[in-house]
Image (cartoon, rainbow, N blue to C red):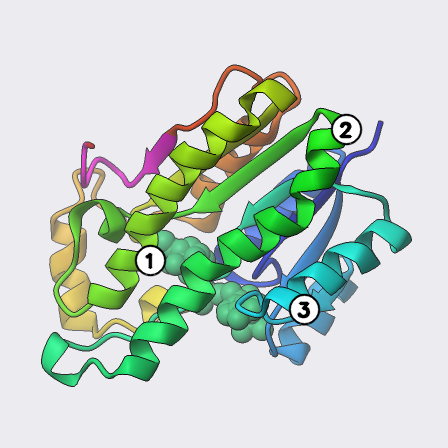
Amino acid sequence: MVRVALVTGGQRGIGAAISEALQAAGRKVVANYAGNDAAAQAFTERTGIPCIKFDVSDFDQCVAAIAKIEVEHGPVEILVNNAGITRDAVMKRLDRKMWDEVIDTNLGSCYNLCKAVWDSMSARKFGRIVNIGSINGQAGQYGQVNYAAAKSGIHGFTKALAQEGARAQITVNAIAPGYVDTEMVRAVPPEVLEKIIARIPRGRLGTAQDIARGVLFLTADDADFVTGSTLSINGGQHMY
Ligand code: NDP
């Protein structure tokens, strides 16, 4: 049986590697994105993976997208909540809009999409949900009160929902990546990045493929006994 997988933010960065790894594992993948049409088109041309544009922070758009995917491809049995943004600022400059955008996009999206697939997964007695958290949700990070709160929330969300899904054979897990070489991290000033790498025992940034490997493990059909866990993939930077 070919299972349908939805990867949010799945056409670039970590999400693109996750989409491609799931496709290589025989899943029928649909990649979501927010607005970067050029990246989406190039990704589809390169991989054959269809992209669907919707805002993961908008509940109605999420519900409509899940319904559309079900009609066009089949029910979503694997959901990877990967889409995320940063709006970094110290508390003094962190305004309400920056707080809301990060909470709604990074954490609200997990509610929106899990809610949209939950009844179907429960009825089918199968589901694999992976939420992408962050080392900064585990350890906190200066200038990231909003992002750390959202990512930390993902870890609690995951543990609670895993308990609700267990009897229906829906597993819910999180991955907490360390610093991974994507556009999000390339936006960090080089002198700051140098200091970050110096603190990673493995001595390098992670790759998107490092994270995708974790997703493959957690979404395998026979990963049935792994639920409510957070897999840290961070080169040894934070042992949680
Ligand atoms: P990128 O900035 O490279 O990509 C972000 C992706 O999310 C894009 O596909 C973007 O779409 C999509 N996206 C953003 N907002 C929305 C939205 N409202 N609706 C739908 N899609 C949206 O991020 P990374 O690949 O670096 O990060 C992926 C995940 O991993 C994030 O959750 C991030 O917080 C987490 N993470 C990343 C780390 C890192 O070091 N890079 C470390 C720890 C965690 P579009 O292209 O259209 O804008």
Distance from label 1 to label 2 (Cα)?
30 Å
Classify 10 Å Cα crowding around label 1: few (below 14), some (14-19), many (20 and above): many
Give the quarter of the image for residue 230.
top left
Asked whether mark 3 lies closer than 8 Å to ligand 1, one says no
Q: Is residue 238 magenta?
A: yes
Determine the secondary structure under disc 3: helix
> Which element carries disc 1, helix, strand or loop?
helix
Residue 233 in the figure: left or right of residue 212: left
Foreground of the two, 203 or 135 = 135
Q: Is residue 104 visible?
A: yes
Q: Nearer the viewer, residue 139 or 179?
A: 139
- Which residue is at a point 82% across and 59% down the rendered structure image? 68
Q: Amino acid at mark 3?
A: Gln
Amino acid of disc 2: Arg
Res. 61 mark: 3
Question: Of label 2 and label 3, which has the lower sequence position?
Answer: 3
At x 60%, y 49%, the residue is 115
Span of residues in magenta: 230-239
Is 206 placed above or below 239 here?
below
Q: Is residue 209 left or right of residue 34?
A: left
Q: Mostly what secondary structure, the magenta segment?
A: loop
Question: At which x and y percent is residue 150?
Answer: 33, 58
Which mark, by number, is residue 150? 1
| Cα separation between marks 3 and 1 | 20 Å
Element under label 2?
Answer: helix
Q: State if disc 3 and disc 2 touch (CB < 8 Å).
A: no
The residue that appears at 33% across and 53% down in the rendered structure is 151
Lower position in the chain sequence, tag 1 or tag 2 = 2
**Quick one: which residue is furthest to the right in this view?**
71
**Which disc, if any, is residue 124?**
2
